[in-house]
Image: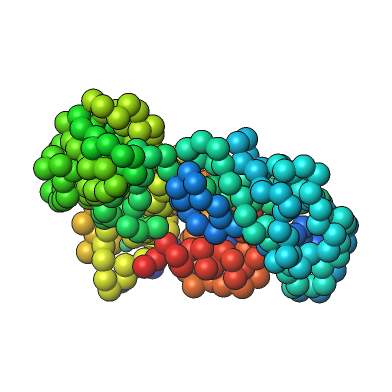
Amino acid sequence: MNRLNITRPARRAALRLAAAAATFIFAFLFGAQAANSEILPPVLVVEFGVASMPLSGQTSLTITVTNPNPAATLTDIQFNDSLPNGMSFPFPPDFSATTCSGVSSQNLTLFSTDPFTLAPGASCIVGLAAVQVASPGEYTNYVSASSSAGPSNTASATLFVLGPFSISNAFTDAQIRIGTSTKLTFTIQNTSATNISGIAFTDTLPAGLVVATPPGSTGACGGTTLSAVAGAQSLSLSNAGVQSGTSCALSVNVTGTTSGVKSNVTGEMTSTNGGSGGVSNTATVKVVGTLDIDASGAPTRYDALTDGLMTLRYLFGLTDTSLTNSALGGTATRTLPADIKAYLDAIRVDLDVDGNGSADALTDGLLILRYLFGIQGPSLIAGAVGTNATRTTAPDIQAYIQSLMP
Ligand SMILES: [Ca+2]
Ligand SMILES: [Ca+2]
């Protein structure tokens, strides 16, 4: 076996270079800085008692305020809630479920709190027993609070109010993996005194959702079923009927083709003799990808030097063979550079590990690569959390990346 004949100074220079490179790689992988700790503002959650109700109904409204800090007290927490247009509460308002201090109403559509204090980890609620609306439709209530640690999140909740002739829709699952399907169900309700006929609507699915193959369409309204073609972006119903005082349901399977939250609202429902039934509520399903970029499956489904490296290269903007060279696992089933890029494009929103609204190589890509190398804790996040990140602690980052590794 031949050995290269290297002079001593040249060898020292090569060793220095190797040491410098190792230091750089170490700093790159493991980072150098510690994360900052700061006092977080309060976290608000808003909920209606029900997701949907008839026009004649009433439901409750609850706002939960939490101090997320383990050691810091929050003071001067204060908010007001101006109800969405068309929503009000009956007089006198019933705030008996409230545990936050000093809530009062200004009129039948607005209430507010006095400034209050929450101990570390503590919560309180403002509970309004009843709200009501005057016309069918979708009502979204937004609330945010000010505090000694700055403004809270803006929390929201949506209430759908059904008229006498209405359509609503819902996904069976709250979340699906990319490439898998969930059932989308439409319910047409007729609480009027007449049988309604000639019912029609079209639903254009949100980008990233298509009719499944096969569509698996079920249900009928007056004997009429959905028109849904495998792979199509829209589906429709025409010439259906619903008898007075009844409802009917129609379902179709839909497949997620890109990651992200998909919101579906039907087009306006029309009829021959019942006028317009309006559009539906907004139904949402979240589509989430996985970090098995090369679709290798077991035994090393998620691997730093294949999936992690291609993710980092992709976020650096590399394409073609620069993306995939020497980075495909032995059992990879997604191997063409164009297919790898298309998959990474489809899951790009998932790659925003630090939650700052953009997927970037030197933060998100590095976090994924480090995690796949088995790095956890402070070394995982050091120097790799972007500006305006919403996931800033090692446990949050770890839990998020783990959610992409089913
Ligand atoms: Ca893999
Ligand atoms: Ca990011």
Identity of the residue drawn at 13% across and 48% down: 214
Q: Is residue 57 above or below residue 133?
A: below
Q: Is residue 207 left or right of residue 250?
A: right
Residue beneath the point at 62% across and 68% down: 394
Whether residue 360 is visible here, answered yes or no, is no
Q: Quadrant of the C terminus?
A: bottom left
In the image, 295 versus 64, the foreground residue is 64
**Position of residue 329 measured from the top left corner of the image (x, y, whole percent):** 28, 62
Q: In screen coordinates, is 149 left or right of 346?
A: right
> Where is residue 272 shown, x and y percent of the image?
23, 25
Tell which residue pokes out farthest to the front in this image: 193
From the viewer's perspective, is residue 406 above or below residue 346? below
Q: Is residue 65 left or right of residue 365?
A: right
Camera-side residue of 110 and 153:
110
Q: Which quadrant of the figure has residue 295?
A: bottom left
Work out whether residue 219 can be spotted: yes
Colour mapping:
rainbow
Task: Check the picture and name the quadrant holding the N terminus.
Answer: bottom left
Residue visible at 55% across and 52% down in the picture? 58
